[in-house]
Image: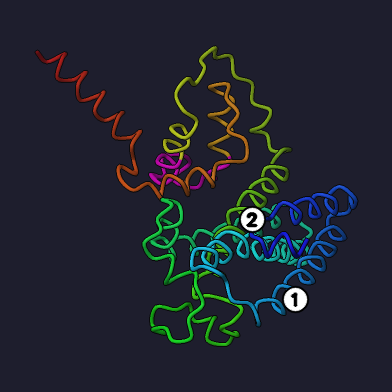
Amino acid sequence: MITAIKNNSLLDFENELSLILNTYSDEIEKAKKIIMFIEDILKQLSDWLKNHAFETVQDEITFFKEVKPNIVAKLIFYKEVLLLIATQPIDKNKKVKHFEKKLDSINQFHRKNREFIKYIKSQSTQFDELYFTRKEYKDLILNDCIVINQDAKLCTSHDYLLAKVIAYELLALHVENRIDNLNKSCSIMNIQFNSNLHWTAKKVDLIELIYALHESKVFDNGQADIKEITHVFEKAFQIDLGDNITRSFIDIKNRKSDQTRFLNQLQDALETKIENDLN
């Protein structure tokens, strides 16, 4: 497996990870086994990196941009999951708040690192050599502060940050799913709708609309939860938005242009209707 990873292939790693996931049913035990597995992999990679010189700059970029961050991301993710489980309260309502607080911190992280996330999402490469190669002398102002206390042979200025980006996207989906499960007993889930309307636009368009309504505080004087609003729309328009709410909103935020694309289309359509009626 290590040989495959050294050759910039994550296939063996993902296969081993799947084996562990399928072997253990207990969530805590599963997370602990995965953490031990990944830490062992990273220790072996660290020993290798201390004496390794990549044949080309592109090989080094590929390793620190595509291979290592995806391994470290899984470690961050499962450590976060363990911490969430260990610190969750007993009361159900308090559990929901517990997980919502984690979602808030994830969103804060995304806001803080918005430009870097845009760089990654847009598949840009112009700063790859700066971000994802090991150089003995770099402008520390450009570096993530965490690398100052790390061995420069083992990391670059941004590979750990990229790992956190990947991990937090996984964590956001995980936390949203937990909140969904906790809210299943809420009365909103049992509301019966008689409408035959079906949402036929894109799911991401509906998600954009839901977030706009939530942020406008038009329901319950702004006290309505985003999940509650989402469930109402799912029931009303017979659509399953799944676990992709937060992830889709992250994609909306990271659009290069026209971030409120669907809302702009709605405004244009209504203005056109008004103009046509007046003529």
Q: 77 or 220: nearer the eye?
A: 77
Residue 231 higher or lower than 148, as above or below: above
Q: Which residue is found at the position 51% from the left and 67% from the top? A: 56
Q: Percent x, y for residue 66?
A: 57, 59
Counting from the top left corner in percent of width and height, residue 3 is at: 74, 63
Q: Which mark is residue 43?
A: 1
Image position, residue 242 (x, y; %) = 62, 35
Rendered image quadrant of residue 150: bottom right
**Is 213 covered by the magenta stretch?**
yes
| Magenta residue span | 211-227
Q: Is residue 215 left or right of residue 93?
A: left
Q: Quadrant of the N terminus?
A: bottom right
Type of residue at label 1? Lys
| Image side of residue 231 versus residue 143, left or right | right
Camera-side residue: 91 or 27? 27
Mark 2 highlights which residue? 171
Amino acid of disc 2: Leu
> Callout 1 environment at 10 Å: few (<14), some (14 to 19), or many (20+)?
few
Q: Is residue 265 above or below residue 254?
A: above
**Does 181 sit above or below residue 121?**
above
Total numbered circles: 2
Please give the name of the residue rendered at 57% of the width and 28% of the height, measured from the top-left corner: 234
SS for callout 2: helix
> Label 2 to label 1, Cα distance in Å?
24 Å
